[in-house]
Amino acid sequence: MLRRSQVDIRNNAAFKSIADANLEALRVRIQSYSHSLEGAVGLIAASDNVTLADWRHYTKALDIETTLPGIRGMGLAIAVPWGAEEPFLDDHDDQPGFLLFRPYYAADMPIDTVEQRLAASKGWVLAPFIGEHFLEELTLDQKTQFHVAVFDSNIINTNTLIYNSEGD
């Protein structure tokens, strides 16, 4: 009985170590995405008019495919007029993933309160990323020691599956 307890303690400690390492790797990956959006906000703040060419130079300099696994690009979110939602929605991609948003504000307005931020809001910079690329290979243990499945619901089925390290 004592021997079984020692094995359980060791196994639990090993699992906790693997889980903690993967959680930290996930935090670092999200933080790198967030820093890229902070840079995009800086680009917008530094210019009176960010052109499409400016935006393309910025995103090209990031080397997104290499430095930000899973990112499908970066963009700006702007208000869509009432009644124009359908054509806008007919354009978005069906691959499951996530969107990371960072607001940007008018430079000459205070943003200390919620009301001030709403009044100063000019839009959002965003980074869409695909779950499969974002969550794969966070650490070396992921393929050999455990598997991860992420669902977009508490209902577990193929319709809510975002990522499964075991494949289909």
Image: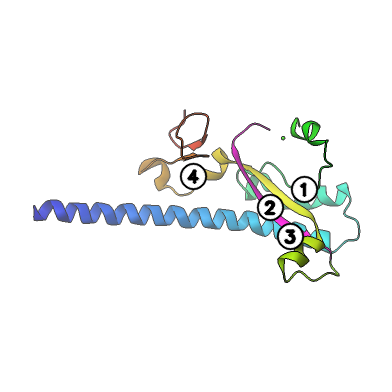
Residue at numbered disc 2? 101
Of marks 1 and 4, the one in the foreground? 1
Q: Quadrant of residue 122?
A: bottom right
Magenta extent: 93-106
Q: Farthest left residue?
A: 1
Q: Residue at x 82, y 59 (%)?
A: 44
Q: Upstream in the sequence, badge 2 or badge 1?
A: 1
| Place of residue 119 in the rendered image (x, y in percent of width and height, measured from the top left) | 81, 62
Left-right relation of 84 to 48:
left
Are dots 2 and 1 in contact, CB under 8 Å? yes
Are dots 1 and 3 in contact, CB under 8 Å? no
Label 3: state its secondary structure. Answer: helix
Residue at numbered disc 3? 39
| Place of residue 159 in the rendered image (x, y in percent of width and height, measured from the top left) | 53, 29
Mark 3–mark 4 distance (CA, rounded to whole Å) = 26 Å
Three-letter code for the amino acid on which mark 3 is drawn: Gly
Are dots 3 and 2 in contact, CB under 8 Å? no
Q: Is residue 2 above or below residue 65?
A: below
Residue at numbered disc 1? 77
Residue at numbered disc 4? 137
Magenta run includes residue 105: yes
Three-letter code for the amino acid on which mark 1 is drawn: Ala
Q: Residue 130, labelled with which disc?
A: none
Q: Upstream in the sequence, badge 3 or badge 4?
A: 3
**Nearer the observer, 111 or 140:** 111
Mark 1–mark 4 distance (CA, rounded to whole Å) = 30 Å
Q: Upstream in the sequence, badge 1 or badge 4?
A: 1
Q: Residue at x 25, y 51 (%)?
A: 11
Q: Upstream in the sequence, badge 4 or badge 2?
A: 2
Q: Residue at x 34, y 55 (%)?
A: 16
Of marks 4 and 2, the one in the foreground? 2
| Place of residue 52 in the rendered image (x, y in percent of width and height, measured from the top left) | 87, 47
